[in-house]
Image (cartoon, grey):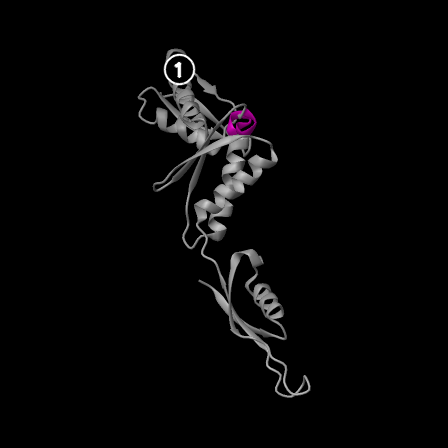
Amino acid sequence: MKSVEKTGKTIEDAVALAVQELGVDISRVDVQVLENPAKGLFGIIGTRLGKVRVTVKKVDPIEAAKKFLQDILDKMGLAVRIETFNGDVTTINLWGDDLGILIGKHGQTLDALQYLINLVANKHGDHRVRILLDVEDYRRRRTDTLKNLALRLAERVRRRGDEIALEPMTPQERKIIHMALQDNPYVYTVSEGDEPFRKIVICARK
């Protein structure tokens, strides 16, 4: 844990100097007083400065991300139950009423929130973590929908022998389509265009 020692005419002055050097909010540090300030003879001779050791508190990255997320939900006035599943990837699933606003069109708002909480988590942690944010299993349902769509359109391409371009998707959603059809003997997939309008084209194999 990062720490510094500073002196000042008062303990408060010493702490302020330490916090400034560490570049963190005072709420994120522990303070140990090493020497209390003392006035010398006539308030001048033998004056002793105060000395402190200020240490940055160890922060759990997942808890930091959840707190950040909870603050957002509170400001939006949403009553939400948060479930956390730990593993190589930590999944945070939100449950409640009228949470469509957290998902957005094709999960765009959900992806943005996920990006932000991962930034917060990896800002505080000593090691990199990855958090998957979900709302009432939306991602699983969306994955199933995209896989079914891919299979249905692949069959149409096989019958007609042409190609079909899908609507623009996020990189994560394009990956689902690619994976769903990678072993299909009748079609193959390519991505075309630039973000955020990049899309998948399903083509018939010659």
Q: Where in the figure is residue 143, as x and y percent of width and height?
A: 41, 25
Tell me where the magenta segment starts and ends, as one range. Answer: 100-107
**Quarter of the view holding residue 172:** top left
Q: Nearer the viewer, residue 40 or 188?
A: 40
State the residue lying farthest toward the front. 42
Q: State the residue at coordinates (51%, 40%).
A: 115
Q: State the residue at coordinates (56%, 75%).
A: 36
Q: Magenta-highlighted stretch: main secondary structure? A: helix
State the residue lying farthest toward the top. 159
Q: Where in the figure is residue 22, as x and y percent of width and height?
A: 55, 63
Secondary structure beneath label 1: helix
Q: Is residue 176 magenta?
A: no
Q: Nearer the viewer, residue 117 or 198?
A: 117
| Identity, as a three-letter code, of the amino acid under mark 1 | Arg
Q: Where in the figure is residue 140, as x and y percent of width and height?
A: 40, 26
Q: State the residue at coordinates (32%, 22%).
A: 184
Query: Compared with residue 34, is residue 85 higher up or lower down, i.e. above or below?
Result: above
On the picture, is 194 further left or further right than 125? right
Q: Where in the figure is residue 58, as x and y percent of width and height?
A: 45, 56
Disc 1 residue crowd, few under 14, some 14–19, many 20+, Cα 10 Å = few
> Where the C terminus falls, by quadrant?
top left
Q: Which residue position holds label 1? A: 152
**Quarter of the view holding residue 15:** bottom right
Q: Is residue 151 visible?
A: yes
Q: State the residue at coordinates (42%, 20%).
A: 145
